[in-house]
Image (cartoon, coloured by chain):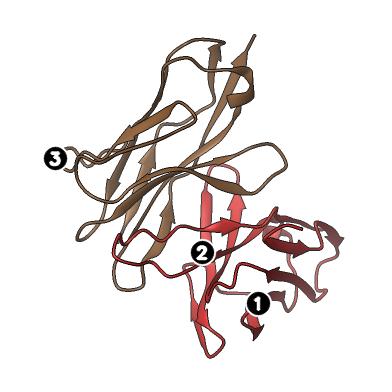
Amino acid sequence: DADVTQTPRNRITKTGKRIMLECSQTKGHDRMYWYRQDPGLGLRLIYYSFDVKDINKGEISDGYSVSRQAQAKFSLSLESAIPNQTALYFCATSGDIGESGANVLTFGAGSRLTVL
Amino acid sequence: GDSVTQMEGPVTLSEEAFLTINCTYTATGYPSLFWYVQYPGEGLQLLLKATKADDKGSNKGFEATYRKETTSFHLEKGSVQVSDSAVYFCALNSGGYQKVTFGTGTKLQVIP
């Protein structure tokens, strides 16, 4: 099984619908992230969580919400989907940074969302 | 704020050609630097990293050297293979929360 599992892998929905993307991990990492990937824009951070009680907005959080149900689970919700939220969404995790200061991310395979 | 600038693609090379993908950054303090690779249909995976000035990260024949004086972390490989075709992302982390900032990605296509 993958270290970071995202469901669904693909989803097509209509404008105004509520959508939830789920992420679970077996890495035992405390830190979890949701990124959005768009062509020509790279990856942009939506939300991040350093533990179950610590959730923070990233650079593009408007229109999204998250829930950290457990250390291993971090869900992203679109309350009312709109077409410009069509994108590839990635969940990622990271563990203790340590003395090196390197925050190495482990990514899921991605969830492709299309909003019509 | 932190930012990463990398060369636009796509880059098309013949097999066994030399590869360079340029990456420069802006960050406060002393960031850690990374290259991630994304193969078609997959998530990103760490290719290599460097955590301090003059460090050289290397993996699978790829190399990159942390150049603080030029704020650069260029990716190189001496002889590319078709299997290296992918999108390559330069990234950094810095600051108290050590958030990771990505460049826009460079698509590499290697033709036989």
Please tell me whether residue B40 is drawn above or below residue A89 in the rendered image. above
Q: Earlier in the sequence, mark 1 or mark 2?
A: 2
Q: Residue at x 57, y 10 (%)?
A: B15
Left or right: B86 with respect to B69?
right
x, y percent for residue B59: 45, 34
Label 2: chain letter: A
Same-chain status of marks 1 and 2: yes
From the rendered image, report the letter of the chain displayed in red.
A
Q: On what subunit does the disc labeled 1 rest?
A: A
Screen quadrant of the C terminus of chain B: top right
> Tag 2, which secondary structure?
strand
Q: Amino acid at mark 2?
A: Leu
Q: Which is more toward the observer, A102 or B30?
A: A102
Say yes or no: labels 3 and 1 on the same chain: no
Work out which quarter of the rendered image holds the N terminus of chain B and state it.
Answer: bottom left
Kindly identify which chain the residue marked by label 3 belongs to.
B
Reading the image, the residue beneath label 1 is A72
The chain whose colour is brown is B
Gap between marks 1 and 2 measured at Cα: 19 Å
Q: Nearer the viewer, mark 3 or mark 1?
A: 1
Q: Which amino acid is tagged 1?
A: Ala
Q: Which residue is mark 2?
A: A45
The residue to which callout 3 is attached is: B69
Left or right, A52 with respect to B93, comes to right
